[in-house]
Image (spheres, grey):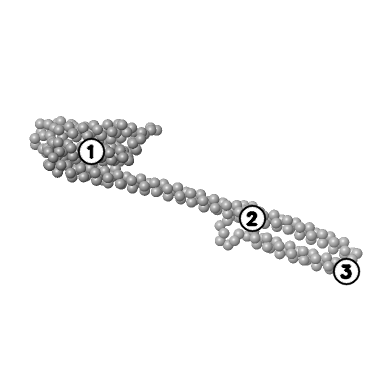
């Protein structure tokens, strides 16, 4: 994985509508070049320079270099190409539209202060080049609208990028929260099941101890009755009543413990596997 230098974020393509607008603007400049009669003797030069600009622009748009230095150099070379075209015929003021495309690239290629420094430089270059070629009043009047577009257009793209970034971050955060909630619910369910199993094991131990003691008591009473039957039959009734009382108490205690072992109505706790 190649490392990116500071100031050179991962470049992203704008939306399809913005891309279409970008190439429509470039096509308008080319068509305007073909339509100007007094450019016919320099037409090959103009078309060649505009073609070089298109190639550099497309490379920087679709396959931008990773290092910030090369991105700066590409923008500088493209700006020089526009200035050369303006120098060949200063009255061809439509060429300053190409600076608008460069402001878009600056927003796509850089972030933070760097992008807006580039936008400011390009907008200032538009105004200076127009004034230098056409004079202060005419040049400024013709450059104001493109300069405004060169600020608003990248600002619009920048805002859209920020919105998309925030939406993506929100989606990632929502997915993480949903996963955390799922894990929490699973942990709660496992804790409830573990608690239910532990409680049933405790009741089972109590049931086992109670049954053992009761059976031992019944066994003693039964053995005593057997011993008293031949020698003291008059005391047999007392032992049988005690035996009945022990049995009845054991039955009630077992019913109570078994009732506690039953899960409450509506409980989602699963029964332990026997």
| Alpha carbon distance from label 3 to label 1 | 122 Å
Q: Indicate which label's residue lies in the foreground, 3 or 1.
A: 1
**Residue 253 appears anywhere in the view:** yes
* Residue at image point 64% right, 59% down: 261
Q: Indicate which label's residue lies in the foreground, 3 or 2.
A: 2
Residue 134 location, x and y as percent? Answer: 12, 38
Which quadrant of the view contains residue 154? top left
* Residue at image point 54% right, 53% down: 188
Horizontal relation, residue 177 to residue 219: left or right: left
Horizontal relation, residue 233 to residue 208: left or right: right
Comes first in the chain, label 2 or label 1 = 1
The local secondary structure at tag 1 comes to helix
Q: Residues within 10 Å of mark 2 (few under 14, many from 20)?
A: some
Which residue is identified by label 2?
A: 199
Residue 205 location, x and y as percent? Answer: 69, 54
Horizontal relation, residue 23 to residue 166: left or right: left
Numbered mark located on residue 234 in the image: 3
The local secondary structure at tag 3 comes to helix
Q: Quadrant of the N terminus?
A: top left
Which quadrant of the view contains residue 141? top left
Comes first in the chain, label 3 or label 1 = 1
The local secondary structure at tag 2 comes to helix
Is 39 drawn above or below residue 207 in the view shown?
above
């Amino acid at each position: 994985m190649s490392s990116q230098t500071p100031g050179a974020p991962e470049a992203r393509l704008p939306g399809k509508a913005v891309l279409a607008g970008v190439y429509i603007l470039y096509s308008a400049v080319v068509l305007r070049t073909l339509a100007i009669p007094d450019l016919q003797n320099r037409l090959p030069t103009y078309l060649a320079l505009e073609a070089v600009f298109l190639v550099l622009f497309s490379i920087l748009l679709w396959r931008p270099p990773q290092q910030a230095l090369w991105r700066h150099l590409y923008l500088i070379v493209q700006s020089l190409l526009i200035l050369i075209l303006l120098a060949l015929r200063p009255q061809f003021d439509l060429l300053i539209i190409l600076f608008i495309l460069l402001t878009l690239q600056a927003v796509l290629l850089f972030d933070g202060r760097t992008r807006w420094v580039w936008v400011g430089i390009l907008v200032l270059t538009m105004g200076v080049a127009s004034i230098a070629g056409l004079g202060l009043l005419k040049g400024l009047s013709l450059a104001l609208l493109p300069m405004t577009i060169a600020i608003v257009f990248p600002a619009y793209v920048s805002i859209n990028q920020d919105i998309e970034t925030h939406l993506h971050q929100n989606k990632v955060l929502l997915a993480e929260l949903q996963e955390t909630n799922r894990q929490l619910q699973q942990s709660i369910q496992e804790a409830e099941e573990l608690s239910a199993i532990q409680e049933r094991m405790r009741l089972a131990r109590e049931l086992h101890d109670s049954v053992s003691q009761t059976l031992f008591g019944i066994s003693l009473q039964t053995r005593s009755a057997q011993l008293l039957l031949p020698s003291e039959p008059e005391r047999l009734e007392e032992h049988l009543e005690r035996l009945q009382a022990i049995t009845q108490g054991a039955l009630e205690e077992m019913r109570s413990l078994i009732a506690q072992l039953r899960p409450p109505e509506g409980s989602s706790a699963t029964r332990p596997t026997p």
